[in-house]
Amino acid sequence: TDKKTEITALLTHILSSPDVSDWYSGKYHIINETQVIHPSFGFSRPDRVMIGDNEVIVVDYKFGDAEEERYNRQVKHYVRIIKEMGYNNVKGFVFYVKSGKVREV
């Protein structure tokens, strides 16, 4: 259908953006929506965690239009937890899929 073709084209365009294309290149070990437990903070569930040779990237996907500070706080929380697990080079991003915007936090 035309709608399916339109959505496929939009996703292909967004995911081929230089900001995110490396995330889908196969160079990372991917963990999607897996619970992480922390002794003090309890359970968390980041949307996507990518573990590379020298870095870990945490991404939370948002499908609405509004950019909100609470999303940044949420990703910062994930980054802090992963650093406490012993990973040093951890980066966090909010990916606003609809607009294709990627914000590092």
Image: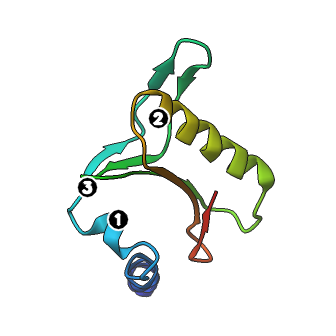
The quadrant of the rendering that contains the N terminus is bottom left
Pointer 1: what residue?
23
Look at label 3 and name its amino acid: Tyr
| Residue 97 spot, x, y in % from top left | 55, 68
Q: Quadrant of residue 63?
A: bottom right
Q: Which numbered tag is attached to residue 28? A: 3
- Residue 18 can be seen in this image: yes
Relative placement, left or right, of 86 versus 62 is left
Asked whether the residues under the numbered discs 1 and 3 touch, taking CB atoms below 8 Å apart as contact, a structural biologist would say yes
Of 62 and 54, the residue lying toward us: 54
What is the secondary structure assignment of the residue under circle 2?
A: helix
**Residue 61 against residue 10 in the figure, above or below:** above
Which residue lies at the image location 36% right of the left edge and 75% below the top edge?
Answer: 21
Name the foreground residue: 98 vs 86.
Answer: 86
- The residue under the point 43% across, 49% down is 89
User: Judging from the image, what secondary structure is the residue with disc 1 in?
Assistant: helix
The crowding category of the residue bearing disc 3, from other C-alpha atoms within 10 Å (few below 14, some 14 to 19, many at least 20), is some
Q: Which residue is mark 2?
A: 82
- Residue at image location 33% in from the left, 71% down from the top: 22
Q: CA distance from mark 2 to mark 3?
A: 16 Å
Check the image and name the residue furthest to the top: 39
Is 44 rendered above or below residue 64?
Answer: above
Mark positioned earlier in the residue sequence (1 or 3): 1
Direction from residue 30 to residue 58 in the image, left or right: right
